Amino acid sequence: MTNIFAPKTTRTQKVLGYFFMLLLALMMIAVFSNTLVNDEIYEPLSLFAAVLSVVLLVAMFWGLKQKNSWLRVNLDNQPRSPVKVILSVTIGIPILLHFSLAKGLPVLLHILLADKAIMIATIDDKRFGYYSRTCDGGLYLGGYSFWGNDYICGIKKEDWDSYQSGDKLALYGDKSILGFTYQKYTLLTDELLQQMIAQSAALKAEAITGKKPMSLEQARKFISQGQ
């Protein structure tokens, strides 16, 4: 790989080098973040990443055909097999672009925009076995369909064993139009649901009237009267 800080490095090489480092940083954010990106955001960005991958790979192969191009020169000077290098890049570019653009970028923006919130999620299934090298206590959630962006981790063993597909969880964390960052959870019971509705009613009453908010008991009575 060319050293982008070398004196003879061209502007094109520097731009590509900085672009690669940016993508690598975004991929690290995607890998280590527990944020779930909304499917409506994830899908178009993943398609864009796929198209960009094709464009970059076509440009790379075209450059390799040019005898005096810097891509060809660098490939010829590689100590490793040119075939292995090309194969690694062909596989690596789509993976790097997918995770950095489809998840890393929206996660970064989500961090800047998110507010505290509670999200109701339905358990779709359990991940294979409780213990994993990357995710202990994993649960797949309904509403998220993309690999690597459809589960949460860190569920306690006793809870994980008792939860079933279709159970609902109240997830506490940070929410934005881009996604949700899960921090803690609890099983959604009827009592908890009524409490959350009461809290929501109390907050709405305060926002509308500007007066002292209702207590939870007053909110519950208000809800029961309207049913």
Image (cartoon, rainbow, N blue to C red):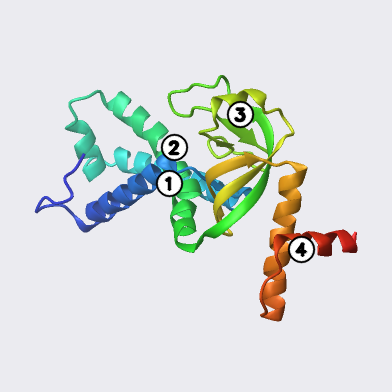
C-beta proximity under 8 Å, tags 4 and 3: no
Which residue is drawn at the image coordinates 71% and 80% (left, top)? Answer: 209
- Spatial CA distance of label 4 from label 3 is 30 Å
Q: Amino acid at mark 3?
A: Asp
Occupied quadrant, residue 127: top right
User: How many numbered marks appear?
Assistant: 4
Query: Which residue in the structure is indicated by mark 2?
Result: 95
Q: Earlier in the sequence, mark 2 or mark 4?
A: 2
Query: Which residue in the structure is indicated by mark 4?
Result: 219
Which residue is drawn at the image coordinates 39% and 43% (left, top)? Answer: 27
Q: Nearer the viewer, residue 92 or 28?
A: 28
Q: Amino acid at mark 4?
A: Ala
Query: Which residue in the structure is indicated by mark 1?
Result: 100
Residue 159 got which mark? 3
> Which residue lies most toward the bottom here?
210
Q: Amino acid at mark 2?
A: Ile
Q: Amino acid at mark 1?
A: Ser
Q: Is residue 215 above or below residue 172?
A: below
Do we see residue 35 in this rendering? yes
Label 4: few (<14), some or many (≥20) within 10 Å?
Answer: many
Task: Describe the element under mark 3 as helix, strand or loop.
Answer: helix
Q: Position of residue 121 (x, y in %)?
A: 67, 43
- Spatial CA distance of label 1 from label 3 is 33 Å
Q: Position of residue 97 (x, y in %)?
A: 43, 44
Q: Position of residue 24 (x, y in %)?
A: 34, 45
